[in-house]
Image (cartoon, coloured by chain):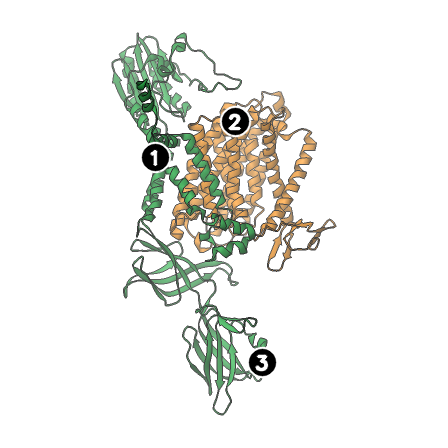
Amino acid sequence: MQQAETQKQKKQKSIFDHVWDFFASVKVAIVIIIALALTAILGTIYPQENAIPSPNPQFYYFDTYGKTGDLYYRLGLSDMYNSWWFLTLVLMLAISLIICSIERIVPLYKSLKNQPVARKVIAIRSDRLYASKAVAAEADLDLLAEQLKKKRYKLRREEGALLAEKGRLPRFGAYIIHIGLLIIIAGVFVRLIPGAYYSDMVWLKAGERKYVDEVGFGLQNNGFELEFYDKAQTRVKKYETDVAVYVGDEVKAKEHLIVNEPLKFNHTLIFQNSYDPNPMFKRGKVELTDKKTGKSYGTFEIDFNDPHQTYQAGEYTLTMINYYPDIKVDPDKGGVFTNSRDPYNPGLQLSISKPGMAPQTQWMMPLAPFVEEMLGQDYQFKLQLVEVELFNMTGLRLQKDLGIPVVYAGCAVVLWGLVLCFYFQHRRIWARLEDGVLHIGANTSKNWIGMGKEFNKATAPLGIEPVAAKPKLKSKAKAPQQAAPQQESPQQEETTQSDASQGKEGTEQ
Amino acid sequence: MMTASSIFFGSALAAYFISAILYVVGVTGRKMRGSTAGKANAWTKWGYILAVAGVLLQITATVTRGVSAGFTPVSNMFEYMSFWALTIMLAFVVINFFYKVPGLGAFVVPVGLTVLAYASVFPREVKPLIPALQSYWLSIHVTTAALGEGILTISFAAGLMYLLVVTDVSVKSRAAKFLEFVVYLFFALVAFIAISLSFRIGGYEVIAQTANQAFLYKMPPIAGPPGIETGSLATLLGVALPLFNAPSWMEGADAAVQFNTILWTIAGSLVLYGILRLINRKPLVVTISRWVRGLDADMLDELSYRAVAIGYPVFTLGALVFAMIWAQEAWGSYWSWDPKETWALITWLYYTAYLHLRLRQGWEGARTAWMAVAGFVVILFLLVGVNLLISGMHSYA
C-alpha cells in the first residue's frame, strides 16, 4: 500500500509541470491570441493618451467625449497598451510561444532525423500517393534514384530501400515564425535597459539652442521654413529646419532636416516631426500716424523677443510701460495678463510723448487692432504694424531605440518563416523492394497536385502508370455525403495506426 | 490625363458591372438549370473575360492617375478603396485562372464592384501629398497591404460558397438565418452606397449649428445633434427634420452625424431588402444557394483556406512589417498604437487564430468557413470602420 502511494506521488505533477502543460497547449495559445485581439479593440475606442493634443488627459477625455470619455480614462483604457494586464497578456503569449515551440520542435527534429530509410511496406501502401511495380529489381531503384536526384532530392539508400527528401526546413516554418516573434518582443523590451531608449519632442524657436542631457548633445534651430501648395495656405507642402547638432559649443553636424529623412547622431535619430501652426512675432516695423489726419510721424522697429525700453519715431519718444508677449484681455477677471512667455500675440502698452506735450498712454495689439475701439477711448495716435516677420516654432523628435535592429531582425525571421511555412513544402518519397515488388509512396506537407506531378514524372521511366493522390482520409467521421472510396486491400485493415502513419509527423498543412 | 483616368475608372466600373451580371445570370440562368449544375457556361466565360478587361482598365486608370498626380494614387479614401477593389479583382482573376471554380465570380465580382462603387462615394480630386506621405514607403506599404486584403477577400467568398453548399437553407436553422443575415449585410452596404451617392450627386448639405459646434450633414438629418430643436433643420418630403436628437452621450465630434448615416443605412437597407424579398418571395439565401448547387464543397473549403494561406503572409508583410518600417522612417517609432495599426494587428491576430485552429486543432469546413466570412467583416472594419468612426493618422483627413 505504501508503494502504491509513492507511485501516486510520482505521478503527481509539480506546479512547474502544470504551468508548462498549460502554456504548451495550443488551445491556451489560441485563447491568448483571441484575448489580445479583443482587448486591443478597447484601446481603439478613443485615442490613446500619446495621441491626444493635450497634456492633461484627466480633463481632455471628459471635455471631448463626455461621461463615457471620463469613464474610459478612469478605467485606464486611455493608456491600456502600457497597462499591467495588457503587458501580462503579451508576456503570456511570449511564454506560450517559447513552450509550444520547444514542445514540438524537439520531437519533430528527432523524428525527422531518425526516420527510417527502409519504411514498412504497409506504411508505404497507405500513403496518399502510392504506386508499385510488379517485377522489379535493385536497378529500378537506381533508376528512380537518378530521376529524383535530378529533381534535387536528397537521397538515402539502404539495401532494397530508398528515401528521397527535400524541403525539410519548411516543416519548421511555423516555429521559425514563433522565434521571429520572440525576437520582436525581445527587441521591444530592449527599451527597458537604461540608456537604450529615449523619446521626446524638442521645440525650438528661431536661433534657439537646447541641450538634451539624456542623448548627450544639443540642437540649434538656424531657421525654419514652411511651404504651402496653395495661396490660401490650407495644404502643407514642405517644412524644414536648418538644424545644427552641438556637443559642448562645437558644431558636430548640420543638416536641412525634412520630414521622413532624419538626421542620425550618436545612435539618436532627429526627426522633423512637426511645427507649431501658430506663428510667433519676431520683428515688426511700426508706423506712428495721426488718427485723424493720417499723417505719418515716423517708424520704429520692435524685436518682440527682446523689446527696448524706449523707441524713437520722428520727434516722438515711445516708452514701454508694459509688454505682454501673449496677451489675453479678460475684463471679467480684471484686466490683462500673458498666456505664455512666447510672442504669439504681443500686446504693448506705450507712452507716447514729445517735448512740450503731455505723454499719452496707448495700447498696441497687432492681432487685435480693434481693441482700441473696445477700450472705448479716443486716441490721438495710431500705431500700425507696416512690416512684420513671423516665425513658427519647429518641433523635432529625438528618438533613440537600440532595440530597432533587433525588431527588424525579428521581422525578417518572421517573414522567412511565413514564406517557408506557406509557400514551400516538405516532400518525401519512399521506395521499398520486397519480394520482387517495388513499392513507392510519397508524402508532402501540402500541394498534393504538385507532388503528384513530380511523383509521376519520376516513376514514369520505370514503366509505372501515372497515379493520383488518394483523397484525404477524414479524421473526423462527420465527412458529408461523398465518403472517400475505400478500396484498400485486406492487409490495410490490419494495419495499426502507428504503422500506417510511420514517417508522417505532425499535422498536415 | 485626369479625364482619361476618370474614363478608364468608369469603364472598369462598367466592365465589373457587366461581368457581375453575366456571372449572376450564368449561375442562375435557364440554360444552367437544364445543364449539369455548377458547370461553367458561356455566360460565366464572358463574365470572366469582362472581369479581366475590367482589371486591365482599372490598372490603366490607376497608372494614368498616378502619372498625372506624380505619386502612387493610394493617398485618400477614394484612391485606397478603388485600389482595394483592384486587388480583389486581380486576386480573383489570377486564382480563378488556376482553380477554375465556376461560380466564384458570381460572389467575388459583386464584392469588387461594390467596393469600387463605394470608392466613388468619396471626393475624387487629386490632392498633393502632405509631407508625412512623401515617401516611397507610401506605395510599398499600401499596395502590399491592399494586395493581402484582396486575397483574403477571396477566402471570404469561397467560405461563403462552401457554407451555401453544405447548409440546407430551405430548412430553418441557425446557419441558414446567419447566411441570410450575411446577404442582408451585403445589401446594407449597397443601400449605404446608393444613398450616399445620390445625396452626393444632388449636392445635399445641411449645417447644424449648436452653441459650440457645427455639424455638417450630407444626408437629411433624421437625428440632430444633441441640443438642436426637432424640426428646425430641414424638411424632406414635407417632414420637418430632425425627427429627434442623437442621444446625449454621443458627444464625439461627428457622433451625431455618423449616427444619422447609420439610421439612413438601416432604413435604406430594410427597404432594399424588403423589395428584393417581396420579389423573391422566399429568403434570398435560398435563391443564392442554387447558384452553387453541385459545386464540390471540399474544393471550396480548400480554396478558402488556400486564399488565407497565400494572403496572410502578404498581409503580414504589407500591413505590419512595411508599416512598421515606414513609421520608423517617418516618426522614429515603429509602433504607436494608432487605431489603424492596432486594427491591422487585430486582423492579423484573427487570421493567426484561424490558421492555428485549422492546422493544429483540426477545424475544417463549416467552422473555418464561418471564420473566413467573419474575417471579411474584420477587414471591412479595418479599412472602412476605422477611417470613418475612429480618428487617427490613417483617417485620410
Q: CA distance from mark 1 to mark 2?
A: 31 Å
How crowded pointer 1 is (Cα within 10 Å; few <14, some 14-19, many 20+) is rated as some
* Residue A150 makes an appearance in the image: no
Instruction: Kindly report which numbered mark, 3 or 1, lies closer to the viewer in this rendering.
Output: 1
Q: Secondary structure at mark 1?
A: helix
Asked if both marks, 1 and 2, belong to the same chain, the answer given is no
Q: Secondary structure at mark 2?
A: helix
Q: Quadrant of residue A423?
A: top left
Q: Position of residue B315 (x, y in %)?
A: 44, 39
The chain letter under disc 3 is A
* Residue B237 makes an appearance in the image: yes
Pick whichever, A482 or B243, lies toward us: B243
Pick whichever, B274 or A293, lies toward us: B274
Q: Position of residue B40 (x, y in %)?
A: 55, 25
The chain letter under disc 1 is A
How crowded pointer 2 is (Cα within 10 Å; few <14, some 14-19, many 20+) is rated as some
Instruction: Kindly report which numbered mark, 1 or 2, lies closer to the viewer in this rendering.
Output: 1
Question: What's the residue type where badge 3 is placed?
Answer: Gln
Residue A42 horizontal side relative to residue A129, left or right: right
Pick whichever, A371 or B312, lies toward us: A371
Identify by letter the chain in orange.
B
Residue that label 2 marks? B366
Identify by letter the chain in green.
A
Residue that label 3 marks? A377
Residue A409 horizontal side relative to residue B354, left or right: left
Q: Position of residue B236 (x, y in %)?
A: 71, 50
Q: Which mark is residue A98?
A: 1
Check the image and report above or below for A316 versus B279: below
Q: Position of residue A331 (x, y in %)?
A: 56, 72
